[in-house]
Image (cartoon, grey):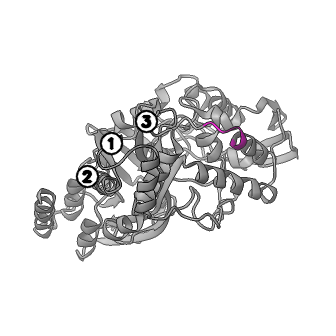
Amino acid sequence: MARLIRLLAILVLLSLGGCREGTSDALVFAVASSPSALHPLLATDAVSERINALLYRPLVDFDAADRPVPGVVRWQRIDDRHYRLALNGSPVPFADGSPVTLDDVAATLRTARDHPASPHAGTLKHIVQIRHEGDALRLNLSRPDPRLPERLHLGVAPASRLEEGGALARDPLGSGAFRFLGWQADGGVLLARRADGLKLRFAVVPDPTMRALKLLHGEAQLVQNDLPFEMVERLARDPAITLHETPGTTFSYLGFNLEDSVTGDRLVRQAIALAIDREAIVRHLFRGHTRLATTLLVPGHWAAHPGLAPWPHDPDRARALLAELGYGPQRPLRITYKTSTDPFRLRIAAVIQAQLAKVGIALTIRSHEWGTFFGDIKAGRFQMYSLSWVGIRSPDIYRHIFHSASLPPGGANRGRYRNPDVDALIERAERLPREQAVPLYRAIQERVHRDLVYVPLWHENNLLLSRGVGAVAPRRDGSYGFLEALEKK
C-alpha cells in the first residue's frame, strides 16, 4: 500500500509539471550514478565506459554486424602469431591538439595488458612483444590468435598520460568526439563536442522520480533507461517529450557465490531458477519492454546459441528439489540477496522474494548504494545478487567472466566459477577463426547454462526520453554514441 501511495504521488507530481526550460547553455543528460573512472582501459562500470567512448577513439571499432573495422589503427595479419598495426590515415588528434602516434598505441596496448586493474589483461596477455617496425608496430603472440582485432576495442590515450597512473581517470584526455571540461559538484561531468562546441552535462540524479521531474520541467533534456516503466509511459504522453525505443543487448541475470555452502549447491540454484516466474515480471514490471534471455549474447549474434531451452517456471519441481535437500515449510532455506538501492531494482527483488517464498526459500534483501554494492560483488561478499552486463559485442566476454583465471581483481568471474572443461573450450575457441569457433562458443553456453552459473533473466530494451533536441536513436548496446550527431533545437 505504501508503494502504491508513493507511486500515485509521483504521478500527480508529473501531471503538475511545468514547461520551464533550464538556464544553462549545456544539454543535460540525467544519469543514475557518477562515472567512477574516466580511464579508457580501467573502467568497469557502465556509465564510465559509455562516457569514455565519447572521450576516446578506439584502436579497432565494430560495425553493425559486430565485425571489427579499423579505428585509430588498421591491421595486417602476417600469420596467426604475428600482426602489424599502422595508423589508419591521419587520426584525429587528442583534444589538446597533440597528434596520436604509434607510441600512444603501444602504451595503450601495454597498459591494457599489464596494469593490475585492467579488465582486458586476460585477453591480451598472449601479446608477448610490441615493437616498432618502420611506420608500424609489430605484435608477436605466444599462441595463435586469428581474431586478435576483436580484442583491440580499446580507447587510445597519450603515452605520457598513461604513465601518470591514476591521474588520467580524473583528468581524461582522448581523441574522441568530445573533450573533457571538468567534474561537477554532483559527481557528474561536463563535456564539449569538439566539432561545434556543444556542451553536454551528465548530471547525477540517483532518484528516478527526480530524473523524471527534471525531464518534465525542462531541467534535463535526456534520460536513458533506469526509470519505472509506468513512469516512462506517463512521460511519453507529454507532447514536449519523445520516447525512443530499440531492442537492447543489456543482459540481466542472477549471480551466485559458488564458494558458498548454500548457493554453491547446483540443486539450490536449480530450485531458484524454477521458482522464478520471469514472464510475470516482464509482463507486469517491464510492461513488455524487454525480452526473456537464455544466454548472455542476444539472439542473432553470430556466437549466440539458438537452441538453449529456457529454465521453465515450475514451482512444484522447485519444492521437490528443496525437499531432497531437507528444506520445506517448517525449515525454509535462508539466502541473502544483494542489490542496489535503485527503487525499480528493489521492486524486482521484492517480486523474486515473494516468488521464492512460495517454494520454501526465505530471501533476505540487502540493498546498498552503488559503490558499496558493486564493491561487495567484486570482493565476493554475497550469496546471491543481480546485475546486468552492458555493451557486449564479442564472445571474448566468456574468458572475462567464466574462465577460472579471471577471478577478481584480474577478471569478472565474480561467482568464482571453476570448470576445467569450460576453460579449455574458451582457450580453444580463442585460437580459431569465427566460423570454426561457433560450435565451441555454443558448447560453452550449454555448460554454463547447465551449471547455472547465472540464472538468465532478460535482455532489456533501451528507452531514451528526450526534449528540446532533434531526432535521436538509442544504440542497441546502450552506448551514448548518438550524442555525436545530436542537434539542439
Label 1 or label 3, whichever lies nearer to me, is 3
Disc 1 + disc 3, Cβ < 8 Å: no
Earlier in the chain: of badge 2 and badge 3, it is 2
Secondary structure at badge 2 equals helix
Which image quadrant is residue 487 in?
Answer: bottom left
> Is 274 covered by the magenta stretch?
no
Q: Quadrant of residue 144?
A: top right
Q: Which residues are magenta?
A: 418-422
User: Left of 167 or right of it: where is 228?
Assistant: left
What's the CA distance linking mark 2 and mark 3? 19 Å
- Residue 250, given in percent of the width and then of the height, sits at 48, 57
Cα distance in 3D space between marks 2 and 1: 21 Å
Q: Position of residue 185 (x, y in %)?
A: 26, 37
**Amino acid type assigned to the residue bearing label 2 in the image:** Pro
Q: Secondary structure at mark 1?
A: loop
For marks 1 and 3, give the CA distance: 24 Å
Q: What amino acid is at disc 3?
A: Ile
Taking the view exactly as shown, the residue that stands out farthest to the top is: 164
Badge 3 marks a residue whose secondary structure is helix
Query: How many C-alpha atoms fall within 10 Å of the one at disc 1: few (<14), some, or many (≥20)?
Result: many
Residue pointed to by mark 2:
343
Camera sees residue 195: no
Task: Look at mark 1 in the image and give the residue it sits on.
Answer: 188
